[in-house]
Image: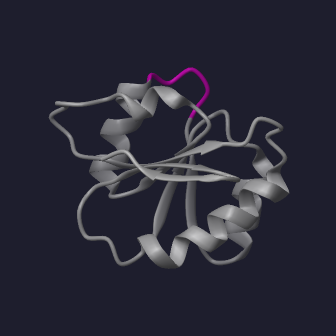
């Protein structure tokens, strides 16, 4: 599974997944959400972000997949724990998806 890390994702999360043999690419600072979606679609990557705007994109030309993290304290180790628990479940998904992931939340938005 390949990921596209939004600029708001802590580097320690990116580093952790790269260290564990995941293909993770970081977005440049200041890139628009629509440009992120276009890149993710083109490169077949799952967007990792804390940006809840990705929960509301609909009717776009490009299908995309995203995991929107919702951890108010944004501690990287907490996000890593929950992401690692989710990954085995989503690796099998064939269609695009958007998940909201938090300590008490796993909601498939689309």
What secondary structure prevails in the magenta region?
loop
In the image, residue 42 above or below residue 20 = above
Looking at the image, residue 39 sits to the left or right of residue 24; the answer is left
Counting from the top left corner in percent of width and height, residue 40 is at 37, 47
Q: Does the magenta stretch include residue 37?
A: no
Instruction: Give the magenta range.
Output: 28-32
Looking at the image, residue 2 sits to the left or right of residue 85; the answer is left
- Residue extending farthest to the front is 104
In the image, residue 79 above or below residue 37 = below
Q: Residue at x 63, y 72 (%)?
A: 85
Q: What's the coloring here? A: one colour
In the image, residue 2 above or below residue 65 = below
Counting from the top left corner in percent of width and height, residue 66 is at 43, 48
Q: Which of 71 and 14 is in front in this view?
A: 71
Counting from the top left corner in percent of width and height, residue 95 is at 23, 62
**How many numbered circles are shown?**
0
Q: In which quarter of the image is residue 10?
A: top right
Where does the N terminus fall, quadrant-wise? bottom left
Q: Which residue is drawn at 20% across and 40% down?
A: 62
Q: Which residue is drawn at 54% across and 71% down?
A: 87
Counting from the top left corner in percent of width and height, residue 68 is at 54, 43
Q: Residue at x 69, y 77 (%)?
A: 20
Q: Quadrant of residue 16?
A: bottom right
Looking at the image, residue 61 sits to the left or right of residue 37; the answer is left
């Amino acid at each position: 599974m390949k990921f596209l890390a939004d600029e708001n994702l802590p580097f320690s999360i990116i580093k952790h997944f790269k260290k564990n043999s995941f293909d993770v690419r970081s977005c440049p600072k200041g890139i628009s959400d629509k440009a992120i979606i276009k890149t993710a679609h083109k490169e077949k990557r799952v967007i990792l972000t804390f940006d809840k705007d990705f929960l509301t994109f609909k009717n776009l030309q490009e299908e995309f997949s995203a995991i929107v993290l919702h951890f108010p304290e944004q501690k990287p180790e907490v996000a890593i724990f929950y992401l690692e628990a989710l990954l085995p479940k989503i690796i099998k998904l064939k269609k695009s998806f958007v998940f909201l992931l938090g300590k008490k939340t796993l909601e498939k938005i689309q």
